[in-house]
């Protein structure tokens, strides 16, 4: 993994997992890693991370901060800690130290506080009903502000 790949992976973990606990960041990084190694997805880290309509985090202020060294130098408090934890998740992925239970994770969905997690995107619901993906209820995460993230694995 190149330094640029690490920067992109750290950025998407930070943008997607935000203030989820470190275990949530590691699960997001596992989703990206699993897609990178899957022939159905682009064969570069950048291609996986920036693939259209895949990671909504690429359209957030956190992504912009992560891609701007000047903005990164201004991070403080909870945001600074979130970025550092994202860097650690990248290092674990790069070093091959990932929980094998995360090996099938391919999708995740985050919800802001006050949004009903049962109202999942139509696409996810269709895939779950068809049996193509499975919700991993044992891997859900809650952030410090009451938001949640659900994780899904592909069943083929």
Image (tube, helix red, strand yellow):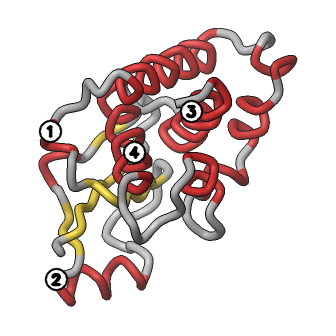
User: Pointer 1 and pointer 4: residues touching (CB < 8 Å)?
Assistant: no
**Left-right relation of 107 to 47:** left
Q: Residues within 10 Å of mark 3 (few under 14, many from 20)?
A: many
Cα distance between the residues tagged 1 and 4: 12 Å
Cα distance between the residues tagged 1 and 3: 22 Å
The residue identified by callout 3 is: 14
Mark earlier in primary sequence (1, 4): 4
Mark earlier in primary sequence (2, 4): 4
Identity of the residue drawn at 35% across and 63% down: 117
Q: Secondary structure at mark 4?
A: helix
Q: How many marks?
A: 4
Identity of the residue drawn at 44% across and 17% down: 88
Q: Residues within 10 Å of mark 1 (few under 14, many from 20)?
A: few
The residue identified by callout 4 is: 33
Q: Residues within 10 Å of mark 2 (few under 14, many from 20)?
A: few
**Mark 3 or mark 4, whichever is nearer to me:** 4
How far from the left and from the top, in percent, is residue 119? Answer: 38, 74
The residue identified by callout 1 is: 100
């Amino acid at each position: 993994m190149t330094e640029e790949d690490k920067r992109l992976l750290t950025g998407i973990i930070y943008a997607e997992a935000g203030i989820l606990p470190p275990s949530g960041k590691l699960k997001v990084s596992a989703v990206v890693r699993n897609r990178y190694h899957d022939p159905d997805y682009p064969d570069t880290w950048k291609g996986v991370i920036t693939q259209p309509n895949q990671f909504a985090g690429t359209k957030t202020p956190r992504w912009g901060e992560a891609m701007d060294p000047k903005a990164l130098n201004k991070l403080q408090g909870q945001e600074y800690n979130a970025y550092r934890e994202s860097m650690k998740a990248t290092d674990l992925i790069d070093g091959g130290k990932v929980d094998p239970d995360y090996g099938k994770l391919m999708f995740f969905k985050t919800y802001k506080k006050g949004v009903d997690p049962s109202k999942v995107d139509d696409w996810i619901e269709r895939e779950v009903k068809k049996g193509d993906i499975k919700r991993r209820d044992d891997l859900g995460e809650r952030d410090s502000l009451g938001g949640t993230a659900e994780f899904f694995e592909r069943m083929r």
